[in-house]
Image (cartoon, rainbow, N blue to C red):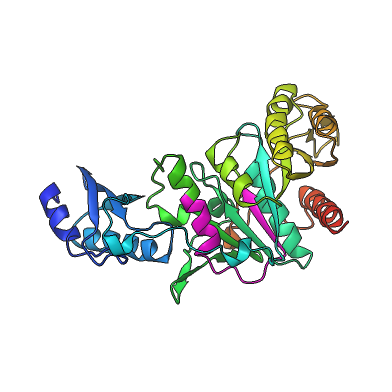
Amino acid sequence: MLSREEVLELLKEIKDPFIHKSVTVRDVKIKEGYVSVKVALAQTGNAEQMQVQQEIVNTLKGAGAESVGLRFEELTQDELPGDARQSNPGMPPLLSPDSKTTFIAVASGKGGVGKSTVTVNLATSLARLGKKVGVIDADIYGFSVPDMMGIEERPKIIDDKIHPVERFGVKVISMAFFVEDNAPVIWRGPMLGKMLNNFFSEVEWGELDYLLLDLPPGTGDVALDVHTMLPSCKEIIVTTPHATAAFVAARAGAMAIKTNHEVLGVVENMSYFESKVTGEKEYVFGQGGGEKLAEELSTDLLGKLPLGQPDMDKDDFAPSIYEQDHLIGKRYMEIAEKVIEKINN
């Protein structure tokens, strides 16, 4: 088993690509073949971090570590050499006033209402309608988009730019690509904002018609950053029929309105269960939440989605994506068509 001293010695050989010195190791923990390392770099959330990440993992596994967990943070301004201290870089092209990309944030008041499921299926449906679509998995603590879409590969780095992974015609970037072994992300608010900004500036998106952002539930730091970065962003609020879920979701909608974001509409998920045997509908979580929320936010109810599971294909595994001819897949296509119509109008 590797010792702490051996890990530190190995990591001395790995350079911070921005200041050309050994990476700064904040912490090392070792337990039963698992090595957890906290590293500080001059910049994070970019292609260079991904290269350092792979180098650390390969080095430690090559020296006998069975599994490696990594956490990254940025060096403080005081820790940086004088020539490495820089002010804000220019605005990414994707965020410039000339950008033709429409941003759609998918939000909810609480977790567990199917916000990420709505995001990935709406994105897939828009792509099926011939649109160029990207997804930012902005739920940085609870990233799930790659798993839901059955994505196993990682982004490629070409000419110092991160190229997102594409599946079902949708380009995807996620915090999941920047951690090892499903490790938890333990960051404070400012770091989250920097990571999100890097998803815009360091990723080669190409031309996009729509970029969907799967926001964390609630009205925390990431949601605030999105409202600041994307003043013309549109939003879709996801709720269940339950009165409490709709009540909590209203906060996310109110936040959008207060920051001059247009609420495109409400999607009610888990609206009912429909028996394949009898065709009878059972309203497991009650009724009326979607209508009530849409009325409160003065917007449209874009659609109601029943409880159901996508058909599993072992050869093309994507546990949360519905086929276009699936009953729920058809509902998503209808919602996607309404979204396009509302944006165009």
**The residue stretch that appears in magenta:** 194-214
The quarter of the picture where residue 87 lies is bottom left
Q: Quadrant of the C terminus?
A: bottom right
Could you tell me residue 20's position as x and y percent? 25, 67
- 7 to the left or right of 19: left
Q: Nearer the viewer, residue 328 or 144?
A: 144
Residue 321 visible at all: no
Is 321 situated above or below 19? above
Q: Nearer the viewer, residue 322 or 186?
A: 186
Q: Residue at x 85, y 40 (%)?
A: 300
Is 327 one of the magenta-colored residues? Answer: no
Q: Residue at x 52, y 55 (%)?
A: 197
Could you tell me residue 132's position as x and y percent? 70, 67
- 183 to the left or right of 234: left
Could you tell me residue 2's position as x and y percent? 14, 51
Is 289 situated above or below 61? above
- 332 to the left or right of 67: right
Is 213 one of the magenta-colored residues? Answer: yes
Q: Residue at x 15, y 53 (%)?
A: 8
Q: Residue at x 66, y 54 (%)?
A: 212
Could you tell me residue 153's position as x and y percent? 48, 64
Residue 69 visible at all: yes
Residue found at the far bottom of this picture: 159
